[in-house]
Amino acid sequence: MRHWGAPAAAVLFFTLWCVGEAGRMGPGLHTWPGTWPLVLMTAAIALAAWKPYASLGCAAALPAGQFLGIVPPMEANHWAIYLGAFVALGFIQWTAGRRTRFFAAGANLVFAGAMTFLMLSWRYSAGLGWFPPLYMGDRWTLRAFGWQLFSLLLLIAAACAAVGLALALYEERGSLFRARSLAQSSLREAEVDLIVEQERTRIGRDLHDVLAHSLAVIAAQADGTRYLSKDQPKAVLTALENISTSARSALVDAQRVIEGVHDDGPAAPQPGLNDVVPLVEGMQGSLAIERSESGAPVELSGGQQLAVFRIIQECLTNALKHGGRGTAVRLHLDWSGPGLTLHVASGIRAAADSPDPAADVRVGRGLAGMRERAHLAGGWVTAGPDGEQYRVTAFLPYGTRSAEAAAPGAESQLVPAGGPAGRRQLSLEEAGHRG
């Protein structure tokens, strides 16, 4: 409306004049004396929003042409064509800048004076037939009727300008309201981010004081027991070594997740598909894992590889937690479709054998974490009991990747823990453990 209102008003102005003067135009527009005044004022209105100075030029061309005798003077039935200049003034006041507005107002003040003289002078319109002739020359005519007509034209021009300014102020007010709403929304988001960051810092500090210390004690105790118990069976020594290794690995992961690094800090390596085999082998002593693959493996992006590793890790952890030691787990990676399909099935412990039946039905955050990881990687996850087994199915589509992500050993595998991606992955870490 702001930019197309002026052309629409020009079309309406021209159409209404043609319809109103249809019976007095004679054979057509080419013989009607008001054709050129109508064309010039229509052009002034049409150009007002886009080219305000060109619009003022068209409005000035009409009185200038009449003074020079190029354009016929106004007659009693079409003098109101002059008002097109004031309509254009309204659009200029609406859409133009402050400097152009002042210039247009001054120009229309001059136009109103020129129009008054042209309409009253005996040399041009001679009073248009509705001002009584005084037969004493232009001086007496202008002295008697000039201020009346000039004031009327100025009043019309002021009304058009006031409408344009009102529309401009309305738009400016709307812009200010939108800017204020945006600023308030940004402030609320910043406050929420600050509260979340403060809460994460507090939780991280508490976990560091408790979890990191406990893991370090577990690793130290396991090593000490293993070194002091050389005569114990090999299975006991192996279990102690696994406890020590797992505690140290968990300590490193916990330190990275809890403490993090700043945006300009060192990069933290993230696990990928190559780490799935060591993960499975490390859990073989506690679970009976059967791993298989079908189809030709396709290289995944760093984020997708991390999602696959964490989903498998969560599934194996849940199988051990809810199924107990020796639980049979089938892990299958299907590469044959349009994406990697991951199937994990584990046995469900009978309710009578469970020391805490409520723990097996408790809904924790592990499933939500897996679904969030799959969603961020472009896929999905379904999970639920299926007879005597608990099945988890994950799908990650193959997608286009950047050269860095596709290159072996690319640095996209190293995600700064304090950067945006690292923060997103850390938040998934927090949601990745059930119970």
Image (cartoon, helix red, strand yellow):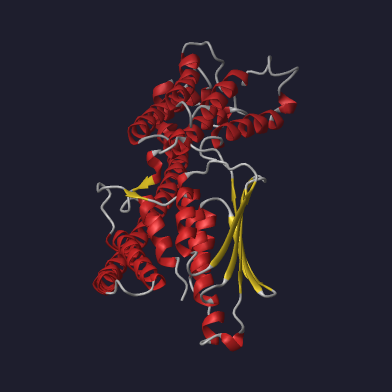
> What is the total number of numbered labels drawn onto the structure image?
0
In the foreground, 334 or 326 = 326
Q: Position of residue 68 (x, y in %)?
A: 47, 11
Q: Is residue 435 left or right of residue 418?
A: right
In the foreground, 215 or 361 = 215
Residue 140 falls in image quadrant:
top left
Residue 31 falls in image quadrant:
top right
Residue at left 51%, top 18%?
A: 124
Residue at left 48%, top 18%?
A: 61
Q: Is residue 281 left or right of residue 75?
A: left
Figure check: 314 above or below 420: below
Q: Position of residue 176 (x, y in %)?
A: 38, 52
Residue 180 visible from this viewpoint = no
Residue 138 visible from this viewpoint = yes
Figure check: 434 above or below 264: below
Which residue is the extreme one toward the front? 231
Residue at left 26%, top 54%?
A: 261
Residue at left 69%, top 18%?
A: 29
Figure check: 251 above or below 12: below
Query: Quarter of the image containing the N terminus?
Result: top right
Residue 52 falls in image quadrant:
top left
Q: Position of residue 42 (x, y in %)?
A: 57, 26
Q: Position of residue 269 (x, y in %)?
A: 35, 49
